[in-house]
Amino acid sequence: MEWVIAVALGLAVGGGAVGVAMQIRLARLRRGLEQRLEAQRKELEAELDQRLERREQEIREDAERRAREQAEARDTEAQQRLAEVEERERQSREREDKVVRKLEALDEKETHLVERENRLAQTQKDLETEREELSRLEEERKRRLEEVSGYSLEQARQELVAVLKEDARKEADQYVREVEAEAKAQAQTKATEVMATAIQRWAGEYVAERTVSVVSLPSDDMKGRIIGREGRNIRALERELGVDIVVDDTPGAVVVSCFNPMRRTIAVRVLEELVADGRIHPERIEKAVKKQQEAMDAEIKEAGESALMDADVHGVPDELVKILGQLKFRTSYTQNVLYHSIEVAHFAGMMAAELGLDPKLARRAGLLHDIGKAVDHDHEGGHAPIGGDLGRKFKEADEVVNAIEGHHFDVDAISPYTPLVHAADALSAARPGARREQMTSYIKRLEDLEAIAGRFPGVAHAYAMQAGRELRVIAKQDEMDDQGAFMLSRKIAHEIEDELTYPGEIKVTVIRETRATEVAH
């Protein structure tokens, strides 16, 4: 036990010595560390002072540089402003100089104007004086002339006017004849224009179409079948066909009335088919109408293709061919419009060949010139503008469209083909037998022609010849000269144009015969 205590005491004394030694060493280490830290602090403070001095030096230098730049900029701006002020002063001085010069020039002009006004006033006074003197001399001259000639001033004026009028008339007549002779002698280009514009004239179009058709019946009992129970059959017919069916007391016939010739034709064919079959009821009517409409469409297309072949025209769109075929069922003054169009195409082609133009283009324009009549029942306006719209729709040439629109001179011509088609149209319509007219109106026209010629002085007799195409006038040879006969033919022609309406043209021929008779003894 004692040894344990001794060991413990030994350890305690040893531990205290070690602790004292450690404290002494730690104190030394602390003093050394504090000395190093103090040395480092002093070094950092010295380095910081140097950096601060350098930064202050840089700031001072930068401030001085900026101050110099601002001073230089202010000097430059001041110089620019000074230059601008000097320039404005210079411009102001120049403007002032100009204004002064203009004022001086205006003063000078004003002075000249005053002088001119004074001179003009004096000249006017002199002119008034001279005018009065001339008037006095003119009156004196007239008085002396009246004394010498024995004519009053008014009588002399009338005689002079009469002489001048007669001389002017003769000179005008001679000039007209010379112009016509010169025109006839021109080259082919001039002749084309003259012939294309003057070959025919058109005095207007009067269309009289048939609007009713008669369907024959085997017996009057068939009328009852057509009417049907309580009128259901006839109502079905009128509804499906778009026509008016008149069943009256006319024996063995019913009348179909419609302004549209194709619908009227279909109605007639449907009625003929139903009458031949004998079975008439709404269902049967509907089938018959559909059948005839299909047949009509085929016939229309065939008619259009046939017309193209007859006229030697190619490249026409199918839809336009169908519209052309509809003209087969149109009449103008009892003249079939499709056959008339084919005839116009041939006339236009032949005349175009004679005039050195394109016959193919002329035939195409002639064939399509009345195309608007095929659809004018469904559109407002005349057939010429309607046809022109169709031509543009199907991309026809401008010459063809213009010929369609202008073949009645509704629009200005842009090529010779328009008056050419007009001439061909008039030729076809005026051809003997092409169109029917009543005998009374025909005779009345002939009488009017002769009466117009008889109203002119110097006419002995007047005869309408060649079915009214020529008016032959016999002039009194002792009452007019050859120049007067020429003027008489013109006056009669103009009077006919103003008073009468007719197709084609009327030729006026004035005949003045000079006979010399002497008796030999």
Image (cartoon, grey):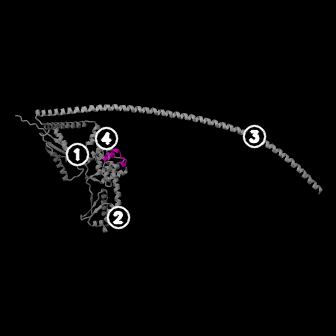
Q: Are marks 2 and 3 in contact (CB under 8 Å)?
A: no
Q: CA distance from mark 3 to mark 4?
A: 121 Å
Residue placed at 61% from the left, 35% from the top?
Answer: 65
Residue placed at 68% from the left, 37% from the top?
Answer: 54
Q: Sequence order check: which comes first, mark 1 or mark 3? A: 3
Per the image, label 1 sits on a secondary structure element best described as loop
Per the image, label 2 sits on a secondary structure element best described as helix
Per the image, label 4 sits on a secondary structure element best described as loop
First to last magenta residue range: 392-405
Q: CA distance from mark 4 to mark 2?
A: 56 Å
Residue identified by numbered label 2: 284
Q: Position of residue 249 (x, y in %)?
A: 24, 65
Within 10 angstroms of label 2, few (less than 14), some, or many (20 or more) residues?
Answer: few
Q: Position of residue 439 (x, y in %)?
A: 19, 53
Residue placed at 88% from the left, 50% from the top?
Answer: 16
What is the three-letter code of the residue carrying label 1?
Answer: Glu
Residue placed at 9% from the left, 37% from the top?
Answer: 517
Residue identified by numbered label 3: 42
Q: Nearer the viewer, mark 4 or mark 2?
A: 4
